[in-house]
Image (spheres, rainbow, N blue to C red):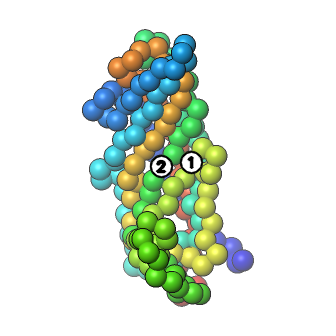
Amino acid sequence: MECLRSFNFTLRNQSNYGASEGFLYWQINSNHYWQIDQSLPNVKYLVQGFKNINLFKIEMTGDVVSSPSFATYEALVQNWKWDLQIVGENSSSVGQLAPAQSPDYMITQGTNPFFRLAKFQPAITFESPIQSAKEIIFTNFYCDGIANKTTTSAQVGFVINVTIFYKYEGE
């Protein structure tokens, strides 16, 4: 593959997530578990310029942790993930799905595809690029863990660097 261009941006936040931000808590025997499942309205990167881009890869580096400076709400983060949508088009497919009995089995994503990047899957590479990418929208943030010190919320912070690898259309 020829050399790709890249740009990056950072997602950064530190918040006390309570029930209104999607915090859930439960206990099994003496083990304390928690999760945060938060919808993210209007968290998007707008691709601008006189040329459209074809997106080949997205990579996230960084971590999500609980802040020790807020010891009352401290918790151990085990996993995290972001759901994202790319406003663009998948390149022409090499086949099609046969009609299924239920739409829950398999779907095709011709435009504006959704993806999930996570702690253990921090990058996705496309063999055929997402064409004419205009926006990268982060739709949901999820994290979970153990040993939270309160049943009502968890203090979680993150600094995640997002790197986009692309080519201009026509190159």
Q: Amino acid at mark 2?
A: Trp
Which image quarter holds the N terminus?
bottom right
* Upstream in sequence: badge 2 or badge 1: 2
Q: Amino acid at mark 1?
A: Ala
Determine the image quadrant of residue 47: bottom left
Which image quarter holds the C terminus?
bottom right
In this orientation, which residue lies closer to the viewer: 114 or 125?
Answer: 114
Q: Position of residue 64 (x, y in %)?
A: 53, 35
In this orientation, which residue lies closer to the viewer: 119 or 24?
Answer: 24
Do the residues bearing badges 2 and 1 touch, measured as CB atoms within 8 Å? yes
| Left or right: 160 as drawn, with respect to 25 | right
Residue topped by disc 1: 118
Residue topped by disc 2: 82
Q: Secondary structure at mark 2?
A: strand
Q: Position of residue 77 (x, y in %)?
A: 55, 29
Q: Is residue 128 visible?
A: yes
Q: Secondary structure at mark 1?
A: strand
At 39% from the left and 18% from the top, the residue drawn is 151
Determine the image quadrant of residue 110: bottom left
In this orientation, which residue lies closer to the viewer: 2 or 115?
Answer: 115
At 45% from the left and 32% from the top, the residue drawn is 35
At 37% from the left and 31% from the top, the residue drawn is 23
Would you place residue 45 above or below residue 170 in this image? Answer: above
Q: Position of residue 7 (x, y in %)?
A: 54, 61
In this orientation, which residue lies closer to the viewer: 24 or 149?
Answer: 24
Bin the neighbour count of mark 1 within 10 Å (Cα to Cα): few under 14, some 14-19, many 20 and up. Answer: some
Would you place residue 58 above or below residue 96 in this image? Answer: above
Query: How many numbered marks appear?
Result: 2
Q: Which mark is residue 108?
A: none
| Left or right: 139 as drawn, with respect to 148 | left
